[in-house]
Image: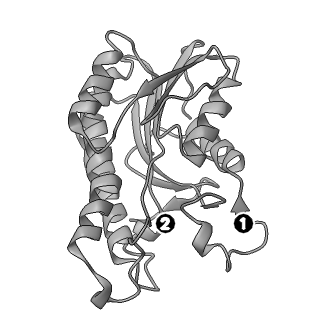
């Protein structure tokens, strides 16, 4: 089981201004063993907590990602969580049928859900501490599982998350050869009461619509419970392994 050997943990949350990202910031800032939480977002925010350090980051701009990584200088991190994602905005809506596909929408979805996490992996992995157990976790989604797809639809979102899952797997394989104490995992947060899920909450079963704080707490526990062969996997909020 994963145990963090450092008792002054450094945690980075990407997408800190979002519902789940903000909940992760608050969750880790409350932990006695956490010394610092780096809150990455497009805009600064007063977290009213001395442990939390805001850092400006635009995940759709590789130069911004490079600058954020350079901001860390020689600092080492124990946990990195990418809590970003795009399902809908303005005129972009999940496709119900093939005829709804549009190149602009697909580009936006892949830019946020796939390309951004890939570049974050590229630039931030070197910032994870060596010779101790560390985690790089990315919010993915159950609907990105090809084998679990029974309803169809949501073409762009499903495809962008499926591609993200492949990136997670490939990165875990590559780094597993030299960084055996590093875990690269995807996380399915469940249905969380946020702007992303608002239009789709009507059919959520009772007790399965989580607050951001609930979801972040569940997912943090999943990270605590990781075992040696869990890198490269996709986990649900309750610890279930979701097949790709």
Q: Earlier in the sequence, mark 2 or mark 1?
A: 2
Residue 142: mark in rendering: 2
Q: Residue at x 29, y 69 (%)?
A: 105
Indicate left or right for 121 with 45 as reference: left
Indicate left or right for 224 with 228 as reference: right
Q: Is residue 80 above or below residue 108?
A: above
Helix, strand or loop under label 1: loop
Q: Nearer the viewer, residue 214 or 102?
A: 102
Residue 208: mark in rendering: 1
What is the image's colouring? Answer: one colour
Report which quarter residue 121 is drawn in: top left
x and y percentages locating residue 49 in the rendered image: 66, 19
x and y percentages locating residue 222 in the rendered image: 60, 44
Report which quarter residue 61 is drawn in: top left
What crowding class fits label 1: few (fewer than 14 Cα within 10 Å), some (14-19), or many (20 or more)? Answer: few
Q: Nearer the viewer, residue 217 or 111?
A: 111
What crowding class fits label 2: few (fewer than 14 Cα within 10 Å), some (14-19), or many (20 or more)? Answer: many
Helix, strand or loop under label 2: helix
x and y percentages locating residue 101 in the rendered image: 28, 81
Q: Residue at x 29, y 45 (%)?
A: 60
Q: CA distance from mark 2 to mark 1?
A: 14 Å
Which residue lies most toward the top here? 74
């Amino acid at each position: 089981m994963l145990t963090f050997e450092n008792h002054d943990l450094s945690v980075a949350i990407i997408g800190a201004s979002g519902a789940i990202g903000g909940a992760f910031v608050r969750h880790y800032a409350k932990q006695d063993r956490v010394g610092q939480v780096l809150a990455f977002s497009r805009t600064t925010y007063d977290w009213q907590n001395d442990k939390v350090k805001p850092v400006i980051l635009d995940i759709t701009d590789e130069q911004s990602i490079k600058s954020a990584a350079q901001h860390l200088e020689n600092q080492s991190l124990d946990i990195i969580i990418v809590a970003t994602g795009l399902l809908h905005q303005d005129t972009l809506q999940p496709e119900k049928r093939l005829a709804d596909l549009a190149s602009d929408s697909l580009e936006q979805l892949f830019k946020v859900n796939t390309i951004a996490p890939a570049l974050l992996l590229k630039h931030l992995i070197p910032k994870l501490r060596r010779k101790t157990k560390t985690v790089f976790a990315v919010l993915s989604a159950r609907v990105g599982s090809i084998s679990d797809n029974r309803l169809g639809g949501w073409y762009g979102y499903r495809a962008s998350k499926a591609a993200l899952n492949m990136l997670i797997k490939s990165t875990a394989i590559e780094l597993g050869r030299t960084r055996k104490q590093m875990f690269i995992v995807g996380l399915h947060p469940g249905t969380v009461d946020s702007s992303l899920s608002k239009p789709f909450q009507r059919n959520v079963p009772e007790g399965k619509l989580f607050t951001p704080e609930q979801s972040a707490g569940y997912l943090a526990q999943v990270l605590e419970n990781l075992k040696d062969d869990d890198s490269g996997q996709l986990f649900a909020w309750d610890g279930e392994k979701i097949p790709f």
